[in-house]
Amino acid sequence: MLQSAKQSKHSYQLTGGGDKFQTALTIEVLEEGIELVHISVTAKQPETPPVLRLSWERPIMDIQGAWHPNGNRNRGLMPDFVNGGYPSKSTSSAPVVCLFNGASRNRLTFALSDTLNPVVCKAGVHEETAMFHCSVTLFEEPTSPFESYEATLRVDVRNMAYYDSLHEVQKWWSGLTGLTPSPVPASAREPMYSTWYSLHQSINPEAIEEQCRLAKELGCETIIVDDGWQTSDNARGYAFCGDWEVCADKIPDMNVHVGRVHSLGMKYMLWYSVPYVGRHSKAWDRFSDKMLYTIDSRGYGVVDPRYPEVREYLIGLYETAMREWNLDGFKLDFVDSFYLPEEKKHDVGRGRDYVSVPEAVDRLMSDIMDRLRSINPNVMIEFRQSYVGPYMRKYGNMFRAADCPNDAIENRVRTIDIRLLCGDTAAHSDMLMWHPEEPVESAALQLINVLFSVPQLSVLLERLPVEHVKMTAFWLAFWNEHRSVLLDGRLEPHNPELLYPLVLASSMDKVIAAVYYRTVVTFDRDLPETIILVNGTRNDGVILELDRDGGSWTLEIKDCMGNVVEQSLYHMKQGVHSLPVPPAGIATLTGA
């Protein structure tokens, strides 16, 4: 079945539907350059829908890169003959693509309202015509039978900063029925310490509490105890997951241990791998016939959330843990492992109360949050990339960058990618680690690269040399002092195709600009009361360009440990200025 609609510069076509479904397209123009394409699918009785594809073309004019939530370091253009595209569902990525030019201006941003079900977005280069073949594909995975379905494609071709276009997408999603984001407690916006990189599975109360004591002195307010508390096996696998009972050999009394951490002034979060049940757990016999799939070589399976008894079991684990151990939150891991393998796409019924896995996951996560919030309204829930899309904002209030140990650049890219779509949900860095013999300026780059997210430390603090401790304390204090701008100010991450070499955050009276390569910070705006320039490189100097005379300012320059290296009165003339900011240092300009 083919439906088409042309009321704009685009000609949209909807293909698929078959004989059992009627489809329709309508276009609503909101303003010049932005429109909504409404998709309607109906049947006379509940039916399982076939694959549907909405497609259109766009000339490749002044477009140098493509942004999507799982881009990581690849911002290149995709040929249209490449299979697949940019897949998403509630527990992975999000249905949005932004095509931008080398000046970080939007040329085409499209996003779908259906962020629950599996969707494949594509913007592929058609070589013969120099056109983008764009499409959004629905129902490639089975969903529950329905009589009617509606979705809306939001298309934005306005000449505006790409990051502003994406910001409007997240606001649009947040306003849709059923996508109201979870409240964010203040504690989710404070620096944290994680045990994962520093201790891995070799944990004990004394080691955890010592890191808490030291981390608290540096400015951290929460401990996240990761994998290892539930098993004596330290092989870093998941064959022993599923029962979620404290390993008495490691933590003899969890309640007492958590109480000691609380007495240090730290909150306590605990890690769980939500879908995994291992062969060496007591839960295996109970749920071995209720798996989406198993990974036999590694000795565990992924439970099927379409069974009500599976959901109730998982929810009960977190409820009991929160009540008995007085936990402040959970790191709920591997939620993106809930998916239906190709060979099981028609495996339904037999005690399952859902056909769709995404719908069952939504029910599971919604019930988890309802019941945990009834115990503690300020419960913190951390999710990890790539399950940081708009649907996950309903449940989680902390979105962390995916694992990238010791890779400061990757951490910057991942945290900025999260920030572009997460609204006021707290974006967190991957855990920060570095070698204690690193040059202190190099170690500082781990913190500087994640300035625009909530930092998480995961380095053995007692092993750090004095200068590293001083550096860490300085940057965490800087982050805390300027947190309202870094997290809540207008975010301007430039040039995604170059991995964000320049990122700015601003409020009415302050601009913070972090430079990650030898580039120029250009101010073509009215200057605020305070300008902070962060040298996120291993080179000396930051280059500033002004389009107007700025008058006299007080200049203070500090090195990476917060030592003042220069104080002077500085005249901000129109033109280019080279400020002698040391590697990983900062310059603060205050209106005189």
Image (cartoon, rainbow, N blue to C red):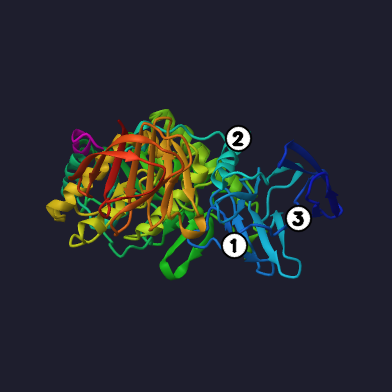
Which quadrant, please, contains the C terminus?
top left
Pointer 2 residue? 178
Q: For mark 1, give the secondary structure.
A: loop
Is residue 219 visible in the rendered structure shown here?
Answer: no
Q: Is residue 233 above or below residue 560?
A: below
Q: Is residue 74 magenta?
A: no
* Magenta-tinted stretch: 260-266
Under mark 1, the amino acid is Pro
Where's residue 492, x and y in %? 48, 44
Q: Quadrant of the N terminus?
A: bottom right
Is 523 on the left or on the right of 244, as rendered?
A: right
The residue wearing badge 1 is 341
Q: Gap in Å between the C-alphas at discs 2 and 1?
A: 27 Å
* Marks 1,3: beta carbons within 8 A: no
Between residues 347 and 220, which one lies in front from this camera angle?
220
- Residue at image position (45%, 49%) is 416
* Residue at position x 17%, y 42% in the image: 213
Instruction: Say what secondary structure mark 3 lies in.
Output: strand
Q: Residue at 38% of width from left, 41% of height from top?
A: 573
Instruction: Tell me which numbered mark, 3 or 2, is placed earlier along the sequence.
Output: 3
| Residue type, label 2 | Gly
Q: Which residue is mark 3?
A: 55
Kindly report the distance in space between the C-alpha atoms of the residues bearing marks 1 and 3: 27 Å
Q: Position of residue 196 (x, y in %)?
A: 30, 54
Q: Nearer the viewer, mark 3 or mark 2?
A: 3
Q: Quadrant of residue 113?
A: top right
Q: Nearer the viewer, mark 1 or mark 3?
A: 3
